[in-house]
Amino acid sequence: MTALSVNLNRVALLRNSRPLNIPSVTHTATLVLEAGADGITLHPRPDERHVRPADVREIAQLLRRWPNVEYNLEGNPLHQLMEHVLAVRPNQCTFVPDAVDAATSDHGWDLARDGDRLRPLIAQAHDCGVRVSLFLDPDPEVMAPARALGADRVELYTEPYARAHGGPDQPASLQRYRLATEAAMRAGLEVNAGHDLNLSNLADFLRAVPGVREVSIGHALISDALEFGLAQTVRLYQAQIRGAEVALRQYGSGRQG
């Protein structure tokens, strides 16, 4: 089963444009959970352009009433992420190699360069009972090293797939993600995916890449909510996920992609 984690950074970005706390990140989280989301993702950045430290704490408080919902904090642990992880102890933290001034996540970790710095931070998160996922490009060769560092999961960076979707490069792109996922699972890792997944490309991805445990979707989902409404949008994304799972059960992964 693939879980849907809704990233609320775009809600926070809109809220921050006026000093009125509208829309409320916490209230939006409640709405998406009531509509059937499986998790909440926040990506607090040092410049607080989106989510702020108060949001991290308020969502942690909210989720005490939702014991089956996963709380995922993502960000660069070499900056300020670990302060939030230690403070609220989410279910999962996703380590992302964002520069402080990055507009958005746009590449995975270089483990040969950064692995020695990540290893003690992974151990620190584990000491708090927090699962660690590393944001990686779809390269089978980096999966065993990620596991050797102590990672529990990887999140595959899916923007290259989103760009290829619907074009002649789509099959080759899906094959890269399928091979990376298979390598991750052989290494003992579970697999998440995220970045630019949307209603048009999500089901195709999940049908072609069996074994994805979680997708984290924010920008596209919040944009779709302007057209369909927030609750209906969550249900539409869940329908794409469930439809892909049904297709895999009926036809088998070998016939997808």
Image (cartoon, helix red, strand yellow):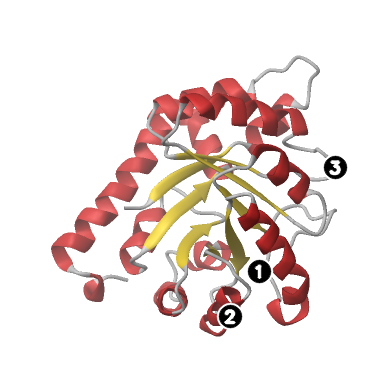
Indicate which disc, 3 or 2, sits on the residue closer to the N terminus. 3
Please state which amino acid type lies under the numbered disc 3: Asp
Locate residue 158 relative to residue 87 in the image: left or right.
Answer: left
Q: Residue at x 68, y 30 (%)?
A: 57
Which label sits in the foreground, 2 or 1? 2
Please state which amino acid type lies under the numbered disc 1: Gly
Residue 111 position in % (x across, y down): 69, 77
- Residue 95, quarter of picture: bottom right
Check contact, mark 2 vs mark 1: CB within 8 A: yes
Q: Residues within 10 Å of mark 1 (few under 14, many from 20)?
A: many
Residue 70 position in % (x across, y down): 49, 41
User: Looking at the image, which residue sits at the far top?
Assistant: 20
Q: Circle 2 sits on which residue? A: 142
Which label sits in the foreground, 3 or 2? 2
Q: Is residue 248 visible from the viewing direction of this image?
A: yes
Q: Circle 1 sits on which residue? A: 108
Out of 13 and 93, give the one closest to the viewer: 93
Q: Circle 3 sits on which residue? A: 47
